[in-house]
Image (tube, rainbow, N blue to C red):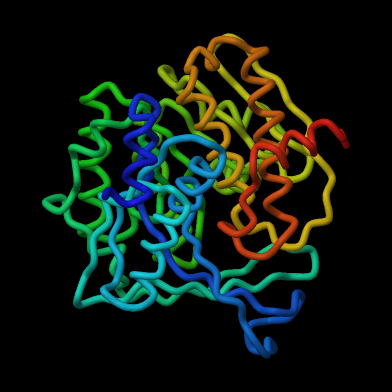
Amino acid sequence: MAPLGDRAAASAPANLVVSFGEMLIDFVPDVAGLSLAESGGFVKAPGGAPANVACAISKLGGSSAFVGKFGDDEFGHMLVNILKQNGVNSEGCLFDQHARTALAFVTLKKNGEREFMFYRNPSADMLLTEAELNLDLIRRAKIFHYGSISLIAEPCRSAHMAAMRAAKAAGILCSYDPNVRLPLWPSEEAARTGILSIWKEADFIKVSDDEVAFLTQGDANDEKNVLSLWFDGLKLLIVTDGDKGCRYFTKDFKGSVPGYKVNTVDTTGAGDAFVGSLLVNVAKDDSIFHNEEKLREALKFSNACGAICTTQKGAIPALPTVAAAQELIAKGN
């Protein structure tokens, strides 16, 4: 009998979204507002943006798969089991006997914003090679989704580039959420250069307002700065503005969609819930890039998903259902 994740992908292969990159263990302090040194205890939670996106897609009824490498250790096997339990196709997952699964300690400040400390020197996800890629799985996708952490070190960078080339050659939509994590890069300049090195390969890009400020070294509220990230051939650029909602830019139209006020506990995974829900809608109907009314409806739903994800600790446990998102939309702000 096929594992749950594989059955989920097989049931809707036409709309499959393949996420590529890292999955790790987040250790989140059990008391918000303390530094890592002051924290007395930590809650263990699965994390890693591309994996969060894959789980968000499945939870919302979409079809998703994950491609990445894990340590052949208890944490690695636990994470792959979490993918399967969440209905994610895991046939692109590999185990490395010589490296550990990555860990991140995530400090929650009083306002629910985060600070990161990573343990990955190198972790298994960084050691995925081009030869190990499941290119057949990637070529079955409608959308190939990735971040920038997989670009930081070899051999994973080369594997990322090869996976992206295979997706583009097969006519698959490429979705990019850079998900800037400065502590992982050698320097700010290296991060900016690395993130922008694949910028023009994407069909769809989602960035946060903080990431716009970092990449452009300017004010994220100034549309000139946002539009400096636009390039010919991009179908959709989204800027998320936290609880204020998001802004959208296409070749033909632009606008903004307000967010939802909720009691924020932990912002971990909010952007991933947003991206996952949008990719579910794009995979179903990519005319969304040309139809402003459809796009606004989808973004309203994505804003609701992102907001709900901030109301409890950890990313994957906090990912919303369709019903929860619809309920928040019905309530309004």
Q: Nearer the viewer, residue 119 or 279?
A: 279
- Residue at the image point whose x is 64% and y is 50% from the top: 270
Quadrant that contains the C terminus: top right
Give above or below for 173 relative to 253.
Answer: below
**In the image: residue 242, left or right of residue 316:** right
Name the foreground residue: 148 vs 75.
Answer: 75
On screen, residue 32 above or below 9: below
Residues 238 and 102: in front is 102
Residue 114: which quarter of the image?
bottom right
Q: Residue at x 21, y 25 (%)?
A: 169
Q: How many numbered discs, if any?
A: 0
**Residue 171 image point, x, y percent:** 27, 21
What is the residue that sits farthest to the left in this orientation? 131
Position in image of residue 196 (x %, y %): 41, 41
Q: Say if 10 sits above or below 292 in the image.
A: below
Q: Is residue 215 left or right of residue 198?
A: right
The answer to which image quadrant residue 79 occupies is bottom left
From this viewpoint, which residue is outermost toward the front? 1
Image side of residue 232 versus residue 255, left or right: left
Return the x and y of residue 240 as percentages of the image width and height: 66, 39
Of residues 25 and 88, the one drawn nearer to the viewer in this rendering? 88
Q: Is residue 201 visible?
A: yes
In percent of width and height, residue 159 lies at 21, 49
Q: Is residue 230 above or below residue 215?
A: above
Q: Residue at x 17, y 56 (%)?
A: 129
- Left or right for 322, reference 160: right
Q: Is residue 193 visible?
A: no
Residue shown at the point (55%, 69%) measured from the top left: 45
